Image (spheres, rainbow, N blue to C red):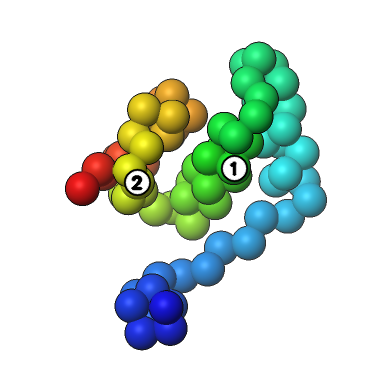
Amino acid sequence: MRENILGNAEITALTAADYKIVIRKLKEGGLSGGIIYDALICSSAIKAHAEKLLTLNGADFRRLLMAEGVDIVEP
């Protein structure tokens, strides 16, 4: 992990306010369950100004990142 990820990535932490925004958006969208974790990842990606998000679960991330400017990449 240290060599492959931490040397090539930046860690972006969410604040309590960020969590509240994610929860509010999910509630407004009628979303619950495991997608909460995907939404937190998306929020971190947006906060970090990420250009791409690598995932094996593109469908969930696409619906969360609509019009946010983060490309979803599926290997």
Question: Distance between the Cα atoms at labels 1 and 2?
Answer: 13 Å
Left-right relation of 42 to 22: left
Q: Quadrant of residue 5?
A: bottom left
Who's the residue at 60% across and 35% down the image? 34
Comes first in the chain, label 1 or label 2: 1
Label 2: which residue? 55
- From this viewpoint, is residue 12 visible? yes
* Residue 48, numbered circle: none
- From this viewpoint, is residue 47 visible? no
Left-right relation of 19 to 68: right
Q: Quadrant of residue 73?
A: top left
Task: Return the residue nearer the eye: 61 or 24.
Answer: 61
Image x and y of residue 66, in percent = 41, 26
User: For the residue marked with disc 1, what is the amino acid?
Assistant: Tyr
Left-right relation of 39 to 74: right
Image x and y of residue 61, in percent = 42, 34
Label 1 sits on a secondary structure element that is helix
Image x and y of residue 68, in percent = 42, 34
Quadrant location of the N terminus?
Answer: bottom left
Label 1: which residue? 37
Q: Quadrant of residue 60?
A: top left
Q: Are marks 1 and 2 in contact (CB under 8 Å)?
A: no
Q: Residue furthest bottom?
A: 3
Label 2 sits on a secondary structure element that is loop
Task: Return the residue nearer the eye: 58 or 68.
Answer: 58
User: For the residue marked with disc 2, what is the amino acid?
Assistant: Thr
Image x and y of residue 32, in percent = 66, 25
